[in-house]
Amino acid sequence: MQQSKASVTVIGLGPMGQAMAGAFLDAGHAVTVWNRTAARADELVARGAELAADAEAAVAANELVVLSLTDYDAVFAVLESVEAAVAGRVFANLSSDTPERARRAARWLAERGAAQLTGGVQVPPSGIGSPESSTFYSGPVEAFQRHRAALEVLTGADYRGDDPGLAQLYYQIQMDLFWSSMSGYLHATAVAEANGISAEQFRPYAVSTASLVPGMIEFYAPRIAAGNHAGDVDRMAMVLASIDHVRHTAEASGVDGAIPAVLAETVRRAVEAGDGASSLTSLVGRFRKA
Ligand code: NDP
């Protein structure tokens, strides 16, 4: 173990916080940990981490404090209990929530002489400790530069700018895409299974269709950016018919049609409003107006 590396504190030992504290230990950092449920620290303590007596002692122990909590309700619950110790600390807050709540926590900390680096971690616990993984960061650039090397023990670091809400914004738009992709996959699997096609039989076809998406994003992004919603390769009226076919197939299979129904209704309103000959991409503007 190299003892010359900066010591760090990790607060919050769910699957993510445990992986993070473990990655710091593996990289030779001295690590102080604290968790509301103390037993979650047992394995890390056995590996050499120090369990602080309380959250305030954990914050007092090190300049860099990583927060890995469920959401910002949990963040505020912890911060309010350690208020006396926050001055001079840099909180790498890797808990998920909205950009606005990230800004509020950053203001709260700044008013007390501390800094927040907001982080949006883009990998599950198994990706922690790998430089190919990536985390969005935003907040004071000098705090980021000062602690970048330590943070890169966890994942690669993608600094997005000063605004403490930005890292959460980038993270949430990734999750927007992720959750709708996963719900589409799970819904299609339900329809497959309802018709005797197993998840394993569906797998190569699911992968094949999902593999089309990156090319579509590459094709459509510059057109969306240019405001070009021409219906030269896809027309909204065709899209509506197709989504209705998906919905009716699901419902005839005894599968809940709510997810395709929401999309069908959104597209139907766009068609009724005059977008029938435009590309599906004109939904971007419709979503914003809605
Ligand atoms: P969990 O919700 O499993 O655990 C987070 C920690 O928050 C636990 O240690 C829990 O303590 C603590 N906590 C919750 N509420 C409070 C509170 N009121 N006061 C004090 N502590 C509290 O989350 P994960 O470890 O899975 O994830 C952490 C963050 O990382 C989340 O924001 C998540 O969205 C994000 N993330 C998670 C990923 C994943 O795959 N797991 C991937 C990318 C991001 P206790 O043990 O006492 O319950």
Image (tube, rainbow, N blue to C red):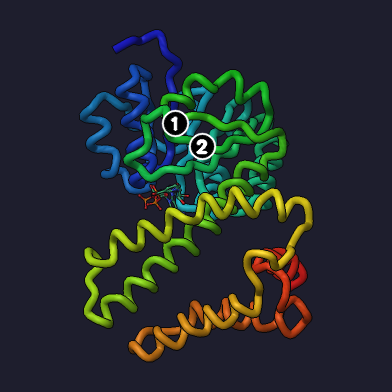
Q: In the image, what residue occupies the spot 28% across and 66% down? A: 202
The amino acid beneath tag 1 is: Thr
Where residue 42 sits in the image (x, y, percent)? 24, 37
Q: Are marks 1 and 2 in contact (CB under 8 Å)?
A: yes
In the image, is residue 254 above or below residue 96?
below
* Mark 1 or 2, nearer chain start: 2
- Relative side of 218 to 124, left or right: right
Residue designated by label 2: 135
In the image, is residue 2 above or below residue 229?
above
Residue designated by label 1: 155
Q: Callout 2: helix, strand or loop?
A: strand
Query: Is residue 286 something that shows in the picture?
Result: yes
Residue 50 tag number: none
Q: In the image, what residue occupies the spot 51% across and 37% down? A: 135
Residue count near mark 1 (Cα–Cα under 10 Å), binned few <14, some 14–19, many ≥20: many
Q: Residue 241 appears in which quarter of the rendering?
A: bottom right
- Relative side of 254 to 78, left or right: left
Residue count near mark 2 (Cα–Cα under 10 Å), binned few <14, some 14–19, many ≥20: many
